[in-house]
Image (cartoon, rainbow, N blue to C red):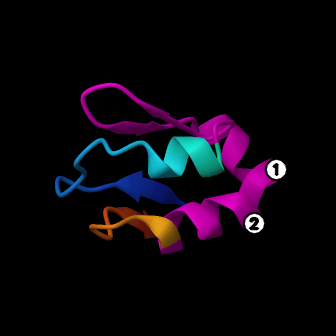
Amino acid sequence: MNVKVNDSCIACGACESICDAVFSVEDVAKVNESAVADNEDCVKEAADACPVGAIEIE
């Protein structure tokens, strides 16, 4: 699973609150690639919860 955050991120923190092992938010959300494989369920949940659809999963 490849995860990226696109430029529409508004740094609301929803992804971090759902899946803090993978996402951290400062100016924009950042992805901890090494944690994605062990946290795929919460990554999907965070992507679904993103209010601007900034989390892209491939």
Q: Is residue 53 left or right of residue 23?
A: left
Q: Is residue 47 magenta?
A: yes
Residue 30 position within the rendered picture, expressed as x and y whole percent measured from the top left:
41, 36
**Is label 2 or label 1 in front?**
2
Q: Nearer the viewer, residue 49 or 56?
A: 49
Residue drawn at the location 33% of the way across and 25% of the way down: 26
Q: In terms of image quadrants, where is residue 50?
A: bottom left
Residue 8 spot, x, y in % from top left: 18, 58
Does residue 31 appear left or right of residue 43 in this picture? Answer: left
In the rendered view, would you say 57 is above or below 29? below
Can residue 1 be spotted in the picture? no
Number of numbered discs visible in the structure rendering: 2
Determine which of the numbered discs, if any, sits on residue 41 in the image: 2
Identified at 27% across, 67% down, the residue is 52
Name the kind of residue labelled 2 in the image.
Answer: Asp
Disc 2, SS: helix
User: Where does the image place residue 16, in percent across and percent down from the top left?
Assistant: 54, 41
**Which residue position is annotated with label 1?**
38
Name the residue: 37% across, 39% down. 29
Q: Is residue 35 something one can see in this rendering?
A: yes
* 38 and 18: which is toward the camera: 18
Part of the protein shown in magenta = 20-48
Residue 6 in the figure: left or right of residue 31: left
Q: CA distance from mark 2 to mark 1?
A: 9 Å
- Badge 1 amino acid: Asp
Circle on res. 8: none
Relative side of 5 to 22, left or right = left
Q: Quadrant of residue 20?
A: top right
Q: Is residue 56 above or below residue 38?
A: below
Assign the N terminus to one quadrant of the image.
Answer: bottom right
